[in-house]
């Protein structure tokens, strides 16, 4: 499963990522900068934001959402997620519990 969170502050995104990694809720993550455009109260807003994209286990989603909501810096956090398909080799690498010392039983 993929989960995405945005923030206008890179430090906030890195803090969330680090806390999720320490809690062993994320195996793989990426942080990247994007140009965001959206409507807010009838006005078009254009700004730079940071995106945190993580690959997670679906059963960890409630705990991850709770942690993100606690740490995020927006009144209305953008948090979206979806399932994905991957090659057998990548799936095996991603879910190799011994490699990461995860206890996913």
Image: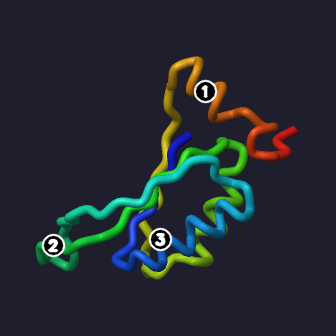
Q: Secondary structure at mark 3?
A: helix
Q: Earlier in the sequence, mark 3 or mark 2?
A: 3
Q: Judge whether 9 appears above or below 101 on screen.
A: below
Q: Secondary structure at mark 1?
A: helix
* Closer to the eye: label 1 or 2: 1
Residue at 39%, 66% (x, y): give it.
6
Q: Quadrant of the C terminus?
A: top right
Q: Secondary structure at mark 2?
A: strand
Q: CA distance from mark 3 to mark 2?
A: 19 Å
Q: Which residue is mark 2?
A: 46
Identify the mark at residue 6; answer none if there is no mark: none
Q: Quadrant of the N terminus?
A: top right
* Residue 54 relative to residue 19: left or right: left
How dense is the environment of label 3, judged by Cα within 10 Å: few (below 14), some, or many (20 and up)? many
Q: Which residue is mark 3?
A: 13
Residue at 70%, 50% (x, y): give it.
60
Relative image position of residue 86 (x, y in whole percent)? 51, 25
Relative image position of residue 39 (x, y in whole percent)? 18, 70
Whether residues under marks 1 and 2 lie with C-beta atoms below 8 angstroms apart, the answer is no
Residues 105 and 11: in front is: 11
Identify the mark at residue 91; answer none if there is no mark: 1
* Residue 77 relative to residue 101: left or right: left
Relative image position of residue 102 (x, y in whole percent)? 80, 46
- Give the total number of marks visible in the rendering: 3
Q: CA distance from mark 1 to mark 2?
A: 37 Å
């Amino acid at each position: 499963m993929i989960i995405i969170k945005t923030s206008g502050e890179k430090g906030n995104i890195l803090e969330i990522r680090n806390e999720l990694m320490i809690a062993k809720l994320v195996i793989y993550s990426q942080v990247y900068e994007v140009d965001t455009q959206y409507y807010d109260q009838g006005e078009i807003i254009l700004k730079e934001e940071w995106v945190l994209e993580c690959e997670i286990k679906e059963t960890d989603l409630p705990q991850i959402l709770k942690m993100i909501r606690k740490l995020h810096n927006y009144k209305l956090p953008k948090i979206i997620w979806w399932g994905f398909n991957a090659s057998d080799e990548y799936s095996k690498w991603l879910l190799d519990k011994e490699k990461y010392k995860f206890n996913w039983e």
